[in-house]
Amino acid sequence: MAGESAAFYRHRARRKHPRRLTCTLLFGAIVTMSALQLARSFSARGIARTSRAAAASTLHTRQLSTQRTAHQSSYDVVVIGGGHAGSEAAAASARTGARTLLVTQNQSTLGELSCNPSIGGIGKGHLVREIDALGGVMGTVADASGIHFRMLNRRKGPAVRGPRAQMDRDLYKENMQRLLLNRDEGNGIENLDILEASAEDLLLDEGEGIETLAPFSDPADADTTPNDDGGGSKNERARLEKAKALSSAKANVNNRRARIRGVVAIDTNTKERIEIESTTVVLTTGTFLRGVLMIGHERYSGGRHLRDSEEVEPPSVGLALTLERFGFPLGRLKTGTPARLDGRTIDWDACNIQPSERPALPFSHVRQARGEEPPMAAAGKLIDCYQTATNEGTHKMVMDYAHLLPQYDGMDGKGNGPRYCPSIYKKVERFAERNRHNSFLEPEGLNTDIVYPNGMSGPYPEEIQLKIFRSMQGLEKVDIVRPGYDVEYDFVNPQVLTHTLEAKSIAGLYLAGQICGTTGYEEAGAQGIIAGANAGRAAGAAYRGEKPPVPFVLGRDEAYIGVLIDDLVTKGTSEPYRMFTSRAEYRISLRADNADLRLTRKGAEHGLVTDPERLAALDMRQNLIADNIERLRNFKLFVTDWAKKGGDDLMGGAATHRPGREFNKKTAEEVLGMPNVSLKMVEDIMVEVFNDEHRQTASEGDSASDKEMIASPTSVYDTVEASIKYKSYVVRQEKDMESWRKAQGAKIPPNIIYDHAAMPSFSKEEIEKLDRFRPATFAEASQISGLTPQSLVYLYHHVMKLNKESRRKKREEMAV
């Protein structure tokens, strides 16, 4: 098998690639690669495929292509790129009523999961729920395609729990394409056309201070009356003032050097040069902006490999040159995808099983409100994942062969990759004290034996990749289906964008996804929905001759999407940005379970949520939550009765029986607020007491069953529990953040020591960056990318403690 898979990239041996490619060579590489016919069947490897399904899918795609390739010459919004950011941007723009065109090089790759076949996770799952709450497509498609579901951090509090699902890669792509392409069949997206073409450049009107064709109105002119709908709107005025400063037409007029007039593209099928007029463009180039692919010391231009093929999708060079010409600060980032393994050659019995959870929790709030499991779970078609790990022998090989890794353009040849999704080499180098690193073996679908080894990316020469894998338990005889590789690409420092993700220097140009320095499908989708919504609202209103809309901006107190975008456009990023719950100062309020309560109504007000069922589901959930919380507030028992029903530990142990406590009553809400008490414990007692009482007092002809109490349904359980248990913490959170805001001007001692001994709660990244930048004030510290709000508050208290200690010592010295 190793010999067979060595032929996978055999075309690379025919060309000698320089370590650093200039723009000219990259452009030449595009021509070279497009001339090569490198498609290759994997049937010789015997990888299980469903031929009929594949043929039907191909036919279906061709039919859709015929339906949708016809396009008009003018649009309100053109979205460039059909990845996760592009899909959400196009769908969001179309939902606002804007005439939208999605331009993609290859229509068959819409919805492709280029790397890990999973959606969600810690922090990321919050983003998916928020995308869904705003009417986005990722959650719906993930539910329809998921084959393994887990809630990460389940043993921790609701604020940090992260829903995650393993996808069937073929199903995910098929379902996304069905949603984006099937407008004519009545179940797609209105106002959206698809063009299979390569976007070569932007059409621009140039001029200093030029007027935009798709303006926003000043947010300060809008109705800012606070409301209490649970959407986190008490800071609405402050947020709108920020939006005014950063997003309005007036704020950026002095920065403008051009405005969007359209896009130049080359039709993939006819090779015809096309000029498409539009007033806005959303650029979602992913890893394609001057992308270079690497295995070992081999380098070749491209954005990624097509799945199950050695064919390379060419990079985007013309767009990079245009951004460079207008002074956009470009840098180089890298990411990698691991080798894919043949599941038939894995010793599964030697690995630890990781079964899917049941019942499986959906991402979609609508499905959750219906009380439905995702379809694959309901049909009993869930899979198991497995866990293995590296060992000391693996680590020795990883370091011994490090000289065979690629030489990158970024960071003096080391490459600038994701800190929190590092290659196996970076893990071993950074954590030399560890003798093992976990790897999760994740099947890529129901009809394939291909397995994704999560956590094992490393672009060594293929024969070295095989040696490394075969050193691991359960993989001693494994075969590689196709080797892993890295891709290095251009990104734009997002500080040149506003909070709408519009560029400050080119009016009507929006950026979203990896081009903004992020990593991950979920981060890309989150940016896409904001960029698409703002482009669609502004351009659509201009086309219809309506009053310019207010910018659609989410605050840090409203959504993780707001945290993500605010971090990017205010702090920028020097490395691939990944979302974590720790990045949010309001994380107790920004839970995955209440995303719809926070955002759906707001999305409807801004034209993003148009589905009546989604709004009805929100109303139902709000009413159920309110009713169940009210029931908890009104239900009372004596403390001793609570203890009898639930045990002494429920009410604080032996203290329950202190004299006098038998006369004290507590509500169910108060009991639930105590440590280690769950909603289920409380409701089990409530149901027992209530039903016993009503059965005893039921009169003749009065059905006792009609009056039976039932526990909170799963659709609201987490939200009811968290709303009560976190109530006091939310108050404390507000106080902490108010103290922090007042402390912005305070100074940090220049001789402060940054280490884990003094700051045990800080991450390695935070210690490293504080020691490197050594901020003089807390205001400066708050601008360091990667430093979390909680750590800033901790640092403030640490400095105050040091100052207090210093003053005490001075007083003692003076006394002597």
Image (spheres, rainbow, N blue to C red):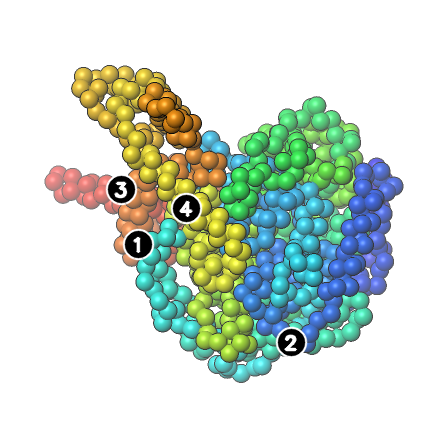
N-terminal-most mark, 3 or 4:
4
Q: Which mark is residue 741?
A: 1
Q: Residue furthest bottom?
A: 207
Classed neighbour count for the residue bearing mark 4: other residues with Cα under 10 Å, few (<14), some (14–19), many (≥20): some
Q: Nearer the viewer, mark 4 or mark 1?
A: 4
User: Is residue 278 depicted above or below 304 in this figure?
Assistant: below
- Residue picked out by circle 3: 801
What residue would you read off at disc 4?
Answer: 622
Image height check: is 280 above or below 749?
A: below
Query: Nearer the viewer's eye, disc 3 or disc 2?
Result: 2
**Closer to the camera: disc 3 or disc 4?**
4
Residue at the outermost front position:
701
Instruction: In the rendered structure, find residue 74 and report the number of the disc placed on it.
Output: 2
Name which of mark 3 and mark 2 comes first in the sequence.
Answer: 2
Nearer to me, 422 or 604? 604
The answer to whether 202 appears left or right of 314 in the picture is: left
Q: Is residue 721 visible?
A: yes
Disc 3 residue type (three-letter): Lys
Residue located at (51% from left, 68% from top): 537
Give me the C-alpha separation between circle 4 and circle 2: 42 Å
